[in-house]
Image (cartoon, grey):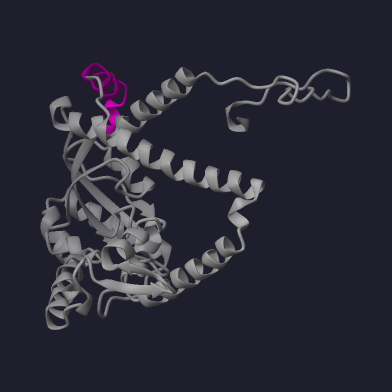
């Protein structure tokens, strides 16, 4: 669908890609799958690491790097890990880890990792009060609204949508004029679905009569979404300009999901908040004391007239 906020390939391409990938995977299985979890896959001096231990190391990477470390860059990642352990081993041999300043840095790193794991565990185990779920739903009901719509797209030169075969390149003015004429044809009684099939430059949705299915807020680009969520049901919009071209939008249905439909989704969204509150309570229960002399607040600077500056607004906090 060309108007979705995150670009996706046309349905035909999207349908073919998984099939091709699956066929390739079936034809060329990953040899690593045959390696047992307890088999040694890496040695650095006297240290050895099993497949399971190596894969646990990958979990310590940022999510965006994990796929590469498991795939085409797995061997390079292993070499980097080997270098890390070799150098760290030499540092321990020189007793650098016994230095007071290093011990505190190591403690901070260790505690930071442990705290991160505890937070993740607390998020997973968090119990959200149903009353908080209902409160969130009532305060954000608009975000659970859904629209079922169709559209006809008229692209213009420079559009992100590929041109249809043998279709002329239209200027923005020409595209607007064509979209206006198409709306007039619809007003004269032509069927939206049939016109979408023959005239829409979004060939993916065009094959289905311009259908975009049902979507929620945030799934479409803003210019399109603003019209789709305010347009009267059953009426065709004026041409709406986006980076893809001019759209004629027909909203067929608009409704809000019920609390019963979204309560689990909301509870998952609220779990991190519950976990952070628990962490704050845990910290407070330990009793934190600061040396007021060492941690004294910095003196407030004054403005050119000798007045203290105004407090920073939310953006400055």
Query: Visible in this render: residue 256?
Result: no
Query: Visible in this render: residue 108?
Result: yes
Q: Is residue 76 left or right of residue 3?
A: right
Residue drawn at point x = 25 percent, y = 24 percent: 128
Looking at the rendering, which quadrant does residue 119 occupy? top left
User: Quick one: 179 or 258, which is closer to the camera?
Assistant: 258
Q: Is residue 304 above or below residue 202?
A: above
Q: How many marks?
A: 0
Magenta stretch: dominant secondary structure: helix
Q: How far across and how far down the image is residue 315, in percent?
A: 59, 32
Q: How far across and how far down the image is residue 101, in percent?
A: 66, 47
Is residue 25 on the magenta stretch?
A: no
Q: How far across and how far down the image is residue 106, in percent?
A: 55, 48
Q: Is residue 228 left or right of residue 97?
A: left
Residue drawn at point x = 60 percent, y = 43 percent: 104
Quadrant into which the N terminus falls: bottom left
Quadrant into which the C terminus falls: top right
| Outermost residue to the right | 305
User: Quick one: 132 or 198, which is closer to the camera?
Assistant: 132
Residue drawn at point x = 24 percent, y = 52 percent: 183
User: Quick one: 220 or 184, which is closer to the camera?
Assistant: 220
Looking at the rendering, which quadrant does residue 177 occupy? bottom left
Looking at the rendering, which quadrant does residue 130 occupy? top left
User: Quick one: 273 or 9, which is closer to the camera?
Assistant: 273
Residue drawn at point x = 38 percent, y = 74 percent: 43
What is the magenta range? 130-143
| Outermost residue to the bottom | 27
Q: How far across and how far down the image is residue 56, in percent?
A: 32, 58
């Amino acid at each position: 669908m060309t108007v979705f906020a995150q670009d996706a390939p046309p349905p035909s391409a999207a349908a073919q890609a998984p099939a091709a990938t699956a066929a390739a995977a079936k034809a060329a299985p990953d040899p690593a799958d045959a390696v047992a979890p307890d088999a040694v896959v890496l040695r650095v001096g006297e240290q050895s690491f099993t497949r399971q231990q190596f894969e646990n190391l990958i979990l310590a990477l940022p999510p965006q790097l994990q796929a590469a470390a498991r795939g085409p860059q797995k061997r390079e990642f292993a070499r980097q890990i080997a270098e890390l352990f070799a150098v760290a081993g030499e540092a321990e041999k020189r007793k650098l880890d016994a230095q007071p300043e290093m011990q505190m840095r190591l403690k901070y790193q260790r505690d930071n990792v442990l705290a991160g794991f505890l937070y993740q565990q607390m998020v997973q185990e968090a119990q959200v009060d149903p009353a908080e779920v209902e409160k969130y739903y009532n305060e954000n009901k608009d975000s659970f609204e859904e629209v079922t719509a169709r559209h006809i797209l008229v692209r213009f030169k420079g559009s992100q949508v590929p041109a249809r075969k043998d279709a002329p390149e239209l200027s923005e003015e020409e595209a607007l004029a064509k979209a206006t004429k198409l709306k007039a044809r619809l007003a004269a009684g032509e069927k939206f679905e049939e016109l979408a099939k023959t005239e829409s430059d979004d060939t993916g949705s065009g094959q289905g009569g311009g259908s975009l299915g049902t979507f929620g807020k945030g799934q479409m680009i803003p210019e399109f979404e603003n019209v789709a969520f305010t347009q009267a049901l059953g009426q065709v919009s004026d041409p709406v300009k986006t980076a893809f071209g001019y759209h004629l939008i027909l909203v067929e249905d608009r409704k809000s999901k019920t609390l019963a439909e979204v309560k689990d989704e909301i509870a998952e969204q609220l779990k991190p908040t519950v976990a952070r509150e628990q962490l704050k309570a845990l910290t407070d229960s330990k009793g934190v004391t600061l040396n007021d002399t060492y941690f004294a607040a910095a003196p407030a600077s004054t403005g050119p007239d000798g007045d203290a500056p105004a407090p920073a607004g939310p953006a400055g906090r």
